[in-house]
Structure formats: structure tokens, C-alpha cells
Image: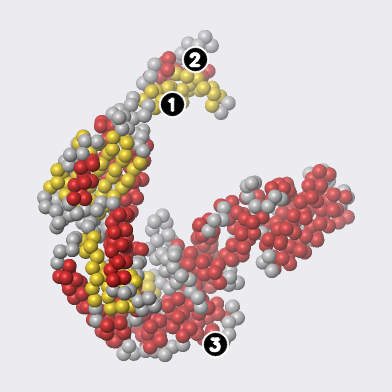
Amino acid sequence: MAKDLLLEIGTEEIPAKFLPAALKQLAEISAELLKENRLSYTSLSTFATPRRIVLLVNDLAEKQEGAVKKVKGPAAKSAFTEQGEPTKAALGSAKSQGVDVADLRVETVEGGQYVFAVKVEESKSTLDILPELMVRLISSISFPKSMRWGDKDIRFARPIRWLVNLYGDQKIDFSLDGIRPDNFTYGHRFLSKGKLEIKDINDYFSKLEENYVILDQNKRQEEIKRQILNLAREQGGEVLIDQSLLEEVTFLVEYPTALCGKFEEDYLKLPKEVLITTMREHQKYFPVVDKEGKLLPLFITVRNGGKEHLEIVQAGNEKVLRARLADAKFFYEEDQAEPLANKVERLKQIVFQESLGTVYEKTKRIVDFAAFLAKNLKLSEELQHSVQRAAWLAKADLVTNMVYEFPELQGIMGREYAYLSNEPNEVAVGIFEHYLPRHAEDELPQTMVGTIVSIADKMDTIAGCFGIGIIPSGSQDPYALRRQAQGIIYILLETELDISLQTLIDQAVNRYKSEGKLKRPEQEVKTEILDFFIQRIRYIFTTKGISADIVEAVLATNSEKPIECWKRANALAKFRATSSFNDLLAAFNRANNLAKKIEKTEDNPIQEWLLAVPAEKQLYQSYLKVEKEVTNKLLASDYESALQSLEELKEPINKFFDNVMVMVDDEAVRTNRLQLLLLISNLFKKIGDLSKLTTN
């Protein structure tokens, strides 16, 4: 009879940010180990609080499922004589697999007959398997940082203080570096006293609930959300719920109780972002706003405990926040002692990267790069000046007191100090926007100034890192180059700027080369950066719903301008849904397959006097007409209409192959016909290499 399995790993408080990933690992590793051991179950759940990580497997089978294993041996003709008697090869194969010769079977594989040893694996009891499985499971969970404690060799996020492992009402016994499971757990650290004896799995859940532990993180999060929303309404406001903060707070508490605190209204004179960052990032508080979105002098925090003595907890939190805000006010006022532009010189004291120089040197490259882009895009002189000014001031806030204390405010404070220094609006906004997008879901720059400076800054970082060999691999990406490359692509897609990736790469790499900071071969660096961007395009397009084969078809021809790739991909996706797609794809493949037999077209590839068969004359005339139409439509980026024009070649191509022999003995005629097919193939490939597409 199937029974539930419970594993609780009791620990010292684990950092909240470690737990979501740990739960995901726990679920994945558990499922993998159970599958590996052929143990069936109906469902699997994972839970976590600061002091425990829990696995629950419902209806886990009492023993393994049966399994038959076949091991390939020698060829049948060498394993048995013509009379069917086993040879030494058969006897040796049976012995090596621990089976009787009678258990050898002959089966046909890939056109040949081979001997297979058939082994029926014994079904072990779940109780016999679980001890080793639990040790492997716990030891397999990894954390960003782990530790050892006492004389233990095992590593975990925090010291393991107790274990509970039950299969139904039976305790599973094992040793994890001397730590053994027992029938005891612990409730809330402060609201529950001493050990809690557990009779069975149902008793475990009820004991925790009675002792102030809401084990299910989803229920805990909903309860926190309900409480903070109600508290904000009671104060006549609305709470600003940041999902990442809500998740973090959920894993900071076992029994949540929300409370509302206040701070002096005078602090509302500080920029809104300063107040929110101080509350959210440093104190884990939820800000409160009025119906117009204006900050109120209130905050909501969540206590790990009950309602007793909330006024003392409130006063303590208010005191801590007051000190934080006082520091912020002091920094804000001190930073205004001089204009933002005066701070740029001090960027010489900040190292961007040891081999790439200071932030001041980076700033000069960004100004130069941004100026090139602005001129290349034919912006007005006034806008070009704003671009260069924003680029010059973009990093100046890094030397301010406020950003030194609150790094999350870089860019935000640059914008605020630019306003206070009477810089133009487009310059101030550009300073903030040049950091965008900061993450996958973040907003993109909305102004041309912010857009250009953002591209210049990100491209400079990518080129510099690749130039000295800092290239993302696996999970290693210390300079967030993947995010920055994706940011550039998203910006180019959104703005539809007529800039190629190759131009951006050339400009960025050449600046490092001119400074003598390029440590690797120039062309190798440029090629690797372009490949890096193409990988990001693949990722972005597929996440946006473009099928993998269409992405490959588009990137196989011309991948330098992301917006053109995007439009071509969408045109192909729409065309694939039409009834004529399969027929046109077949016609293209017929032409393309033979076109591969000739390397390239000449300047005047077709000798009309060699076109003797009516079908090839018709195909050539159709090509000339369609080529002109397609070229004009491609110039207008009208890829859907271009594909419709290409449809006109379907019938002429099919008639050509029905009536014309291409690979004739006459070399001139053969070459002429192959050149015609190559012209047609290349015309299609201006939209995409259709040979990479699959039929519907």
C-alpha cells in the first residue's frame, strides 16, 4: 500500500534569497532520484520557512516497479553454431552479465542480428531504498554560499539542527555525517517552546500549525499580502507591492504579522526613489502612497511573530528608519554643494576594470561613441549636443555620497542632481535612461538621448570585456554581458534604428584598439561579439514566440540588423500559416538543392542565347520580373509582400524541373542553368534560408 513520505531539514535561519532556488532543486532532484529508483508516486510538494526545508511525496509506492534490462552482446553468428549450440562468446557474455545462457535472446538491430542478455531486476522495498536516497538528496542541494560547522564535513546553507523523515508512520533511519532523523520537530522560535513529538505525517502538519508555523510559503505570502493591503486601506492609502520584496519577506518569517509605522513628513522633500529605496532595499518595508501615487509618511513591515507588544516593535522600526532617512537627507544636501559636472573629474579615481582603465576613461569612450551614433543617425545639432552632454555626465553620480551609500540609486540620482544643476530635461532624463533596461522586465529608454547613450555604454562594456578575454561561460557572467547585449537588441527592436550590429561592434572595438587596451586579435574579438549577439537574438526571438527553424532561416542570411531579422521572421511566420507555404517551400528546395553545385553567380551570369527550352526561358523571364518587385519591396521592408511576389516563381520552377534536364554533358548549358537556379535561390534567401524550414 502506498504511503506519504515526509522529509524535514531543520536548520538555523537560512537567508531568504537562498530558499526559492533551494525549493526548485529539492523538487527536481527528488523527482529524478525517485524515477531513477523506479518509485512511483502521485504528487510531490516542497515547502520552506527560515528554519526548515520540507519535502512531501504523496502516495509513494511500497516497492520499486519491476524492470527488465537488456544488454547487447556479440553478433548472433559468433554466439551460436549452425546447430544452435552456444559458443565461448555466448557463454562469456552470459557469465559477464550474471545470467543463464537460456536467458540470451537474438534480436535484429540495424540490419544485423545480435545476442542480448535479458536481466530481470529485483524490486526492492521502498524502506530499504530510502535511507541512501535521503542522504543523496540532502547532499545534492547547493546554495550560493554554504558552510561547515562543528566537526562536520557536510556543507549546507546553515547548520542542520534536526531531521524528520517519515514514511507513513515509520521513521526512516540514516546518518548524515552523524546527524540522524528523529520523531521531533520545532515550532516558531519564540512562540513555541521545546521539542514537538511527531506521531505521523498528519500530526507533523497539525503540530506546526498549532505552534505558529505556516509551512506553505504560498499561504504565507497570501496572508502577508492580505494583511498589508488591509493596513494600507485603514490608513487611507495603497501599499506599493514589489513582488521580489514580497517573496523575500515571505521567506523571512514563519508566522507573519504586519504593522504600520510612521516617519516625519519633512523627509518627503527627498526624491521619491530615495525614500522607496531606503524602505524597500535596506529595511524590507513596503511604502504607502495616496490615490494619486504620492508617498505618504507611512511604511508597512512584517513581524515574525504574533500581535503581542506591536507598539514596541513599531517604535523600534520607526527609530531605525528615522536614522536611515536622516543619513539620506544629509547625503542629499552634501551632494548639492557643487554641480554634477564638477564631479566628472573624480571618476579618474574609480576603476572600471583593471585592464580597461577608469570610469573616466570609459566616460570619454562613451561620449565619442554616442557622438558617432548621433551624427550617423543625422540628429539635429541641438540633439547631438544633448547626447554628448548626457554621455559626459552619465557616470558622475557614482562619486556622490548618495550613490556610494545606496548603489541602487545610480542613474536616478544622476537625473535628480542634473535637474538641480539646471541641466536640460533631455540631458537629465538621458542620464537615468542610459542604464535601461536594468533587467529582463524593465522599461526601455523612451528618449533618443537615453537610447543612444544606453547603446554606447553597453556596447563599450561588451567590447572591452571580450577584448581582454572576459567572456560569459555557463552561469559565469560577472559583468552581466548577456543582459547588456539583450538590452541593446531590445532597444534596437523597439526604436527600429537603422544601425547594424557590425557597425556597433566595429566602433566599440576600434576605440579600445586605439587606446592599446585590446589584448586579443581584433578580428577574432569582433567575430566572437557578433556570434554572442546572434545567440541573444535566438533567445529573444524564441521567447517572443518565433519557432526555432524560422529563427535559423532568418539568421542564416543576414543577421546584422535585429529589426530586419524580426520583420523577416514575422513575415515568414505569417506566410507559414498560408495554404501555399508547403508548395513554395518545395519549389525553393528543388532549386536550392541543385544551386549548391555551383559556388557563386557571375556579374552577368545568364547567357540568354543558351536558354533553349521554353520552360527555362519562362523561368528566367519570371525571375527578372519578380526580382525587380522583390528588390523594391525589400527596400521598403515589406517582407510579406515580397514573399507574395516570390509565390509567382512556384509554377515556373516546377515547369522547369518537369521539362528541363539541368545536369547535361554540355558544360556551358549546365552552368547556365545552375546559375539561374542560384539566382532564384539567392533571391529567396534575401528573406531567409527556407531550406532550414520544416513543412506544416
Kindly check if marks 2 and 3 are in contact, taking CB atoms under 8 A apart as contact. no
Which residue corresponds to the image point at 31% horizontal and 62% vertical from the top-left?
A: 226
Indicate the amino acid at tag 1: Val
Q: Position of residue 166 (x, y in %)?
A: 23, 38
Horizontal and vertical percent for residue 540? 51, 60
Distance from disc 3 to disc 1, alpha carbons, whole Å, reads: 77 Å
Image quadrant of residue 636?
A: bottom right
> On the image, which quarter does residue 95 sit in?
top left
- Do the numbered discs 1 and 2 sit on residues whose CB atoms are within 8 Å? no
Check disc 1 and report the residue beneath it.
71
What is the image's colouring? Answer: secondary structure
Residue sitting nearer the eye, 238 or 68: 238
Residue 680 position (above or below residue 283)? above
Q: Nearer the viewer, mark 1 or mark 2?
A: 1
In the image, taking residue 478 as reference, residue 305 lies left or right, namely: left
* Closer to the camera in the image, 138 or 242: 242
What residue does disc 3 label? Answer: 382
The correct choice, above or below, for 487 with respect to 74 in the image is below
